[in-house]
Structure formats: structure tokens, C-alpha cells
Amino acid sequence: MSLKKHSSREETTFRNISLVVMCIIAVTCILPFVLMFSASITGEKELIKEGYKFWPSTISLDTYKYLWAKRETIGRAYGLSIFVTLAGTLTNLVITSLFAYPLYRKDFKPRNAFAFLVFFTMLFSGGMTASYIMWTEVFKIKNTVWALIIPGHLMGAMNVLLVRNYYSTSIPESIVEAARIDGASEFKIYTRIMVPLSKPVLITIALFSGIGYWNDWTNGMYYITNPRLYTITVYLNNVMNNINLLSQRSSMTEGMSIADLSLPTVGVRMAIAFTAIIPIIIVFPLIQSKLIEGVVVGGVKG
């Protein structure tokens, strides 16, 4: 009886310590977002003089007035980011799950050759120069929306292996064999059995891919020179790199300069960054359980 009480006391202590540690980690993760929002509503003079603070002495909405004045440009960038993220993530899911399916099938003879291709891409790449020449000179995707979707994000070797392992550990081969005996084609097996039963890992891949697309600015920097094709992260990067150019462009295209709006050059970057992460903050809690399940099961070696 005393042993059970001692064990129960240890479990309670461990649970309390774990709770405290998790609370500390949670607060540590939340504080940067609080600081970002605080900086976005801090007066420009205070930011320049005193730097970032959690509790600003003076509150200014000049940054959000600027966002509203540039709502057409920023709205277009936001909409393009949403389209690129959705289209790229959906395409990524289809290609990744299709590529993982033959790797899962033990009766597929070229299975080893396909697996070699996956592992080879994890070890070697053609380099940025060769990739840039290929995409711009051969495929001609520069200054097109495809330049924001295809290079670097369309399919990842780690995602393919994650889905393949999920197939191997979570979907019994007997189900596939029974479907084949009943006359189901490979496409029907894939669409009616593999995809519905692998929702947790597909949601995990979708989250990884979606965050990658949403946060990506390198493709825009390499392949996009048309401002109308700027995503929100490319637009933010443009603001951070050259706020003076942004001011000149604003005055030429809209008849209004940043000076007319008393735009804080420091705070506006925080305001754009804060608005850019809102979709991730909203979506992540909704799929958290599926994410954990997909990572745990998909990470088991099959």
C-alpha cells in the first residue's frame, strides 16, 4: 500500500513539474508574437530611441493606417500567398502520396530504383546556379506563378519516406489484397483505401508544406521581378530591404507618400509580419492532434 502511495506521489510530482516546464515553454513561444504586435503599435520615435518593448509608452496606429492605405497591394500579395499555399500544398500531397505508393508495394519490381531516386535527392543536388538556369532558361517559369510553386517545394524526399512508412505500418496488406481480389484497380485502391486511411500523415505533410509555401520568400527573390506577383513574405522582404524604394513607389503609383501617412519604417515591418502569421496561428491548433499522430506513426521505420 505504501509503495502505491509513493508511486502516486512521484507521478503527481512529475506531472506538476512537467506542467510548469510546458507553461514556461509556451510563454517563451508566445512572447515573440506579443513583442511583434507591441512593436507594431509603438510610436516611431519611441522605437528608434528606446527599441522594442512589451509595453509601449505611446501607442500609434500609423502602421495599420499604412496597411489600410496600401490595402490593394497588400491584399493582392495576401491573396497570392493563399493561392500559392493552397495550390502548392494540394499538388505536393498528390505527388508525394502517389510516389510513396509504389515504394510501399513489395510486388512492384522497380521499387528499389524509385527508392534510390528518393535517397539520392537527399544527398545530392544540382546547386542553385544549375537550378536557376534550368527553371528560367528551359522551363521559362520566371515571373509566373509557377515559379512560386514548383522550385524547391513541390515534393520532398523526407515527406515521401514519411508517407511510405505510414502506409507500411498503418495499412494492412490484407486490405489491399482483398480489394485486388475483388477486382479493384490500382487507382481505385489508391483513392478508396490508401488516401482515406492515411489522413493523419497527409495532414502532417500538408502542414509542413503549407508553412513552407507561406513563409517562402527565396523563390520570389530568385524568380520574381514583377511586383504584382509578390507574395506577402516577398513583399515584407522588399519592405525590409528597401523601405525608401517602397516610399518612392507608393508616391508614384498612388499619389501618396509614406511621409504623408507618417509611416514608421520600423513598425510597419512588424505590422506586416504580424498579419502574415495570423493564418498559421489560426490553422495550427485545428490540426494539432492529427499532426502529432501523423509524425509519430509515420516516423516508425517500416
Image (tube, rainbow, N blue to C red):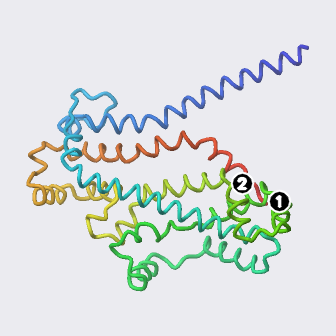
Q: Which residue is mark 1?
A: 175
Tell me if mark 1 has few (under 14), some (14-19) or many (20+) residues whose alpha carbon lies within 10 angstroms of its own: few
Looking at the rendered structure, which numbered label has been put on residue 88?
Answer: none
Find residue 21 and report its horizontal and vertical position in percent.
Answer: 60, 30
Tell me where residue 128 sits by quadrant: bottom left
Tell me if mark 2 has few (under 14), some (14-19) or many (20+) residues whose alpha carbon lies within 10 angstroms of its own: some
- Farthest right residue? 1
Q: Residue at x 28, y 47 (%)?
A: 269
Q: Which residue is mark 2?
A: 197
Q: Earlier in the sequence, mark 2 or mark 1?
A: 1
Q: Spatial distance from mark 2 to mark 1, Cα to Cα?
A: 11 Å
Q: Residue at x 68, y 46 (%)?
A: 293
* Foreground of the two, 173 or 115: 173
Q: Residue at x 47, y 62 (%)?
A: 87
Label 2 secondary element: helix
Q: Label 2 is placed on what type of residue?
A: Leu
Q: Is residue 126 left or right of residue 276?
A: right
Find residue 182 and report its horizontal and vertical position in percent.
Answer: 83, 66
Which quadrant of the figure contains the C terminus? bottom right
Tell me where residue 107 sits by quadrant: bottom right
Residue 245 sits above or below residue 105 on the image: above
> Contact, CB < 8 Å: mark 2 with mark 1?
yes
